[in-house]
Amino acid sequence: MSFIWSLIVGGILGWIGSLIVGKDIPGGVIGNIIAGIIGAWIGSMLLGEWGPEIGGYFIIPALIGAIILIFVVSLIMRAARKAT
């Protein structure tokens, strides 16, 4: 059950991060889940573990990490579109 809860929280974090950045992550719901999970890892590596915890994720660092990830992915996607 914790795996499903982790997927749900990761998806919500990825979705909120894409709303804040104003860019959609490729892959829809699956992309949001991946962005949320990887963003949580990035955020915990950069900012540590603080703030409220839901589903095994510390929300504030995870959200900041998801925002960073989505911003970087959008820059890469824009550069790839210009190169072709």
Image (cartoon, rainbow, N blue to C red):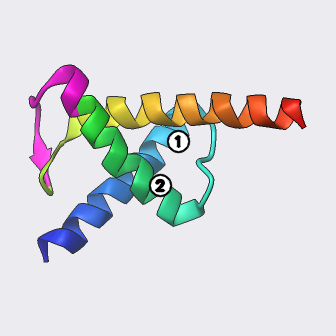
Identity of the amino acid at label 2?
Answer: Asn
Outermost residue, front side: 83
Read off the residue under disc 1: 18
User: Where is residue 37 shown, x and y percent of the image?
Assistant: 32, 50
> Position of 15 compared to 12: left or right?
right
| The N terminus - image quarter | bottom left
Q: Secondary structure at mark 1?
A: helix
Read off the residue under disc 2: 32
Q: Which mark is residue 3?
A: none
- Image: magenta residue range: 44-54
Q: Residues within 10 Å of mark 1 (few under 14, many from 20)?
A: many
Q: Inspect the magenta stretch and tell me whether residue 45 lies in it.
A: yes
The mark lying in front, picked from 1 and 2, is 2
Q: Secondary structure at mark 2?
A: helix
Q: Inspect the magenta stretch and tell me whether residue 53 lies in it.
A: yes
Identity of the amino acid at label 1?
Answer: Ser
| Inter-mark Cα distance, 1 to 2 | 8 Å
User: Where is residue 10 shown, x and y percent of the image?
Assistant: 32, 55
* Residue 64 vertical placement versus 25 (above, below): above
Q: Is the C-beta separation of discs 1 and 2 under 8 Å?
A: yes
Q: Residue at x 40, y 37 (%)?
A: 66
| The C terminus - image quarter | top right
Q: Residue at x 30, y 33 (%)?
A: 42
Q: Residues within 10 Å of mark 2 (few under 14, many from 20)?
A: many
Q: State the residue in front, 79 or 32.
A: 79
State which tag comes first along the sequence, 1 or 2: 1
Q: Residue at x 24, y 22 (%)?
A: 46
Q: Residue at x 75, y 32 (%)?
A: 78
* Residue 3 vertical placement versus 24 (above, below): below
> Position of 72 compared to 45: left or right?
right
Outermost residue, bottom side: 1
User: Where is residue 59 shown, x and y percent of the image?
Assistant: 21, 40
